[in-house]
Image: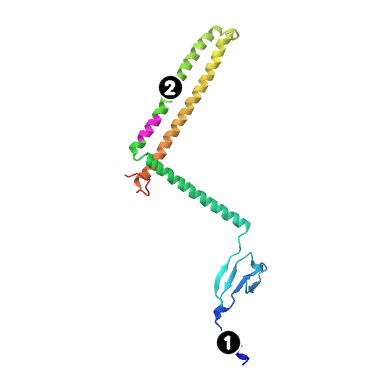
Amino acid sequence: MLAAPTVQAQSAPATTRTPIYTCTDAQGRLLSSDRPIPECSDRAQRELGPSGTVRRVIEPPPTPEQRERLAAQQRAQAEAAARAAEQQRREQLLLMRYPDEAAHQRAREASLAQLQASLQAAQQQLQRLDNEAQRLQQEMEFYRKDPTRAPAALKRRLADNATQRQQQQQYIDDLQREHARVVQRFDDELATLRRLWAAPPTDALAPAR
């Protein structure tokens, strides 16, 4: 009669047994317990089933350095996704603005014509200043032997003319750099647009070809 409970306990289903946790601690010792092992809180622990098979591996919580690396990776991924979305938005707006190559060429010619007109006007103004400088220098010829006798007004006009010519030349240089930037921008846009025009539409913003 006393042996009956023992036999019943031994014949109970194995699935009711408590899982075993095992790990190797920092000193290289193999530890086992019926609950997660505090000595291995900084390393992986294995949870074993009744048959000794591994049910799962319990990874340790990340260290501050690991958390920082993970956060940096997540930030980088978010930034890359934002850049990709912004690039897609820009491309769709570009398609809407220039539905075909003729429209893009018209915009290119209009932008460059405006810059060319400004550049031509600036060069004409510089030529007028150069002519004025020549006239002023001719007046200074009268005082070549003794420049100190030249009138103050003449000296002031020469100085002002030199300043204006320098500023005008700087303005011309800026216009020429802007012209080069506009040409490059339209070239880059055209390369992108040709790729987009050749691709099948992917959403409602893409124009019908």
Residue 33 rendering spot, x and y as whole percentages:
63, 74
Q: Is 60 on the left or on the right of 114, as rendered?
A: right
| Mark nearer the N terminus (2 vs 1) | 1
Circle 2 — which element?
Answer: helix
The question of residue 59 being in magenta is answered with no
Callout 1 amino acid: Gln
Give the quadrant of the N terminus. bottom right
Q: Residue at x 40, y 31 (%)?
A: 111
- Residue annotated with mark 2: 121
From which residue to which does the magenta span run? Answer: 105-112
Residue extending furthest toward the right: 27
For the residues marked 2 and 1, what is the alpha-carbon distance in whole angstroms? Answer: 108 Å
Q: Is residue 8 above or below residue 115?
A: below
2 vs 1, front mark: 1
Q: What amino acid type should be assigned to the residue bearing mark 2?
A: Ala
Neighbour tally class for label 1: few under 14, some 14-19, many 20 plus, Cα within 10 Å: few
